[in-house]
Image (tube, grey):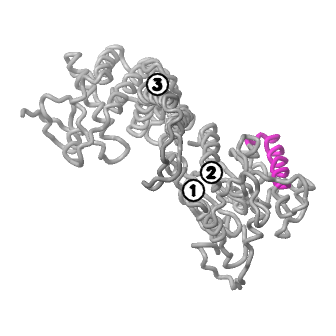
Amino acid sequence: MEYRIEKDTMGEVKVPADKYWAAQTERSHENFRIGGEIMPREITHAFGILKKAAAIANYNLGKLSAEKLDVIIRACDEVIEGKLNEHFPLVVWQTGSGTQSNMNANEVIANRGNELAGSKLLHPNDDINKSQSSNDTFPTAMHIAAVIAIEDKLFPAMEKLAATLLRLEKENEGIVKSGRTHLQDAVPIAFSQEISGWRAMIEKTEAQLKLALPGLKELALGGTAVGTGLNAPVGFDEEVAHEVSVITGKQFVTAANKYHALTSKDALVFAHGVGQFSKTWETTPDGREGFQNIFLRRGFPTYLVDQPRRGNAGRSTEETTISPAFDEEVWFNRFRVGIWPNYFEGVQFSHDKEALNQYFRQMTPNVGSVDFEVYSDAYAALFDKIGPAIFVTHSQGGPVGWRTLLKTDNIRAIVSYEPGGGIPFPEGQVPEEGKILTLSKKTEGVEVPMSDFRKYTKIPIIVYYGDNLPETDERPEIYEWTRRLHLMRRWAEMLNDLGGDVTVVHLPDIGLHGNTHFPMSDLNNVEVADHLSKWLHEKKLD
């Protein structure tokens, strides 16, 4: 094999003479001999699209000559068409933020462009990478590649498969077979019913992907290295998004917040409720996946925290006495599973005895006093350590969330499932319902300075309440949640009047029925999670 000598800041390196890549690509090729998984060609072709769009944008903004633009476009078109695939040898195992793949594209386009021009016209960094950084090009390439693959390849295949399954459903009506669980025959099932489950899976997955597409069509390009847009001309980001849209025939937009666009999804920090610990979020009483895994699968980092003096954080400097408590009936009723020992009709809770046993076993005593200042201090310290994240609270975790927001600037949104008590209102403006004592002998509402109250208008907030909320106070332990729903609606109204963004959702109103005090672990918790995912997407938090 013949070689040529290329140079970079580290010195000389030999590159195959018949390849368009240069020194930086070669160093990655030599240093990362790990596996054989070549960077997907969809990503390679997407780099061709974004480099072409960037060149056009730079030309439109007076940053690139017409002569250079012409040869860059010609070289990029060859990348897009797959004619230069052999010149992209790098594997997926790389360091950094896709720097090597970005430089691979820059070097190949520059050298091929120079060959087309018949002169040393283009420089990989100064021309092909102008107004860009690896930090914004690689996520942009991934988004472009994903959108094209989903819309042009995956959706047509899914629609064809769903149509085929629908046909098979009709063709197999009346055929009864043995249903199988755990690889053993179970109970009879119509074959058409079985096929319908497969079809519904395809259709539901397609619907979920469609919800994700708007986020994928937001491009990080223009944020450059850290999101500030340093070294990119004003308007470059919008020009690039427009040109990518023209090239692909799909509607891309520039990301509103480049700091976020350069990163992964925001983390979710989970706060449990009274008598609970992190198990609330890990799994469900009947053994299914909890929100921790559901949202991990959806690409969100998750943090589970045990409140101080609870669960795995059970060490305390306070002296305390823990007495045996036979409180199963209390938790069963108060958290709206039913009226002991009978379940509510249609309740989203397993009637299996072991599920109820596990539900009770999740109840954890406090090793010390309940102290919202200690709890919120702990969560604020976590947010200050991990950076911006979304706070997901439940029950007693609700007032913890309201207090934590006043102690850190890193809460981007609050999601609260059935928050209980400690609702902050401006001084002198607590509604009458907020002055009523709870079963814990505390008022539902608390007074805060107007300056603190306005802080709740700075981020989006969504609050959820479940089903079986009585209209009368015949059973005070259940009616307490009805009163809290009314009070949270009043709270949201006051904040929204001040320019806030607070949504209160009563789950039956959106078609989700039978939910207990624990919507995130009920039998329909995936549907509950779907609504949250949709809201996070609408608020550009995914």
Residue 458: which quarter of the image? top right
Graded by Cα atoms within 10 Å as few (under 14), some (14 to 19) or many (20 or more), the crowding at tag 3 reads many
Residue 307: which quarter of the image? bottom right
Q: What residue type is labelled 2?
A: Asn
Assign the C terminus to one quadrant of the image. top right
Seen from this angle, which residue lies furthest right?
432
Residue at the spot x=69%, y=79% of the render?
368
Q: Residue 483: image x %, image y %? A: 85, 55
Task: Tell me which label, 3 or 2, sits earlier in the chain.
Answer: 3
Q: Name the residue under label 3.
A: 240
Task: Please determine whether, in this image, residue 382 is positioned above or below residue 413.
Answer: below
Q: Count all numbered tags in the image, as a single digit.
A: 3
Assign the N terminus to one quadrant of the image. top left
The magenta span reads: 482-501
State yes or no: residue 492 in magenta. Answer: yes
| In-front residue for pair 29/525 | 525
Disc on res. 525: 2
Q: How far apart are marks 1 and 3 (CA)?
A: 40 Å
Residue 209 visible? The answer is: no
Graded by Cα atoms within 10 Å as few (under 14), some (14 to 19) or many (20 or more), the crowding at tag 2 reads many
Q: Which amino acid does label 3 sit on?
A: Val
Q: Residue 351: image x %, image y %? A: 66, 60
Q: Distance between the residues labelled 2 and 1?
A: 8 Å
